[in-house]
Image: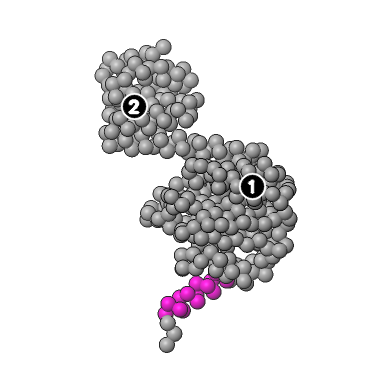
Amino acid sequence: MINKTYLLALLLLTQITISAQSPYSDPLASTYSIVARDSITGEMGIAVQSHAFSVGSIVGWGEAGIGVVATQSFVNRAYGPDGLKLLKSGKLPAEVIKILTASDSARDVRQVAVLDMQGRTASYTGKKCIQAAGNIAEKNFSVQANLMLNETVCPAMVKAFKETQGPLAERMISALEAAQKEGGDIRGMQSASILIVNPVATGNIWEDKPIDLRVEDHIQPIEELKRLLNLYRAYEHSNLGDLAVEKNDLTLAEKEYGLAEKMLPDDIEMKFWHAVSLVNKGKTDEALNLFKTVFAKDANWSILIPRLRKSELLICSDETEKIILNVK
């Protein structure tokens, strides 16, 4: 009798083989990318830049607790979801690439990289990918590129990723910057993206991809991606401030809102919530200058003051409210 587990595995591989047989069915995404894992936090990610519109919607795929896939050059989008299915079934990254490319008649123009939750990697560059093209796969990361101006792109990405300190997202963007300094995509720049997935699935899909940022069309997409990541980090602090308010931890709220404002000193919303947190801690005098700046730029923010008191998110007396609203 044939083992049921064997039959299920055979069915899965058959489905994946079929979906990988559509040569040239998707856009050309000549590009450079990095798939990587943080050896401390376990986070995994994919970052990419290309002279192609909305490259993030084509190249990068990831699933919390499973891994990430980059599919590029003459893209076969099925490599993304099918690669993740294969990882989930227990296949190693090298096995995943072997299965994906085996039945693909356009394998010679494909480029793909796979990383799993343990940091094992594999990458493949078809022999007909437009030069300069290549890939470098090591423990916890792989870089890959095609249609580059110079052969030095991939080595530069490796060096930057290894030498940059800090969170995974910032290290990956550093690799993109290094690629561009070496000439990058011979056609120039247009779009970029970064996706980070958690090391363990939470069961809540909105929590499993903490970072999912895309620059669809921009003259300087990597710089814009960096700006968006900085915004994300600032809003991380702001959101932690909101959670602290929910828990009535006013000290932590003041700290987190303050950090958010420091990261975005020209953002009036960050100033406003920092000011609110100061009032809630009895530091109205410190808050007044912040309120003054906010109200001068947009008087609508002052309308929120009595509304926040009614919702018990601003804790102050009638007299203090008047002082805030009349700040000059």
The magenta segment is 4-17
Residue 12 is left or right of residue 24, and the answer is left
* Residue at mark 2: 277
Which residue is painted at 51% across and 42% down in the image?
A: 165
Where is residue 161 drawn, in percent x and y? 56, 47
Q: Identify which amino acid the numbered label 2 is placed on.
A: Ser
Which residue is painted at 54% across and 43% down in the image?
A: 164
In the rendered image, the quadrant that contains the N terminus is: bottom left
Q: Dot 2, crowdedness within 10 Å: few (<14), some or many (≥20)?
A: many
- Look at the image and tell me whether residue 254 can be seen: yes
- Residue 145 drawn in magenta: no
**Depth check, front residue: 262 or 322:** 262
Residue 171 is left or right of residue 191, and the answer is left
Q: Residue furthest toward the top?
A: 328
Q: Identify which amino acid the numbered label 1 is placed on.
A: Ala
Which residue is painted at 62% across and 42% down in the image?
A: 177
SS type, badge 1: helix
**Depth check, front residue: 159 or 148:** 159
* Residue at mark 1: 156
- Look at the image and tell me whether residue 48 can be seen: no
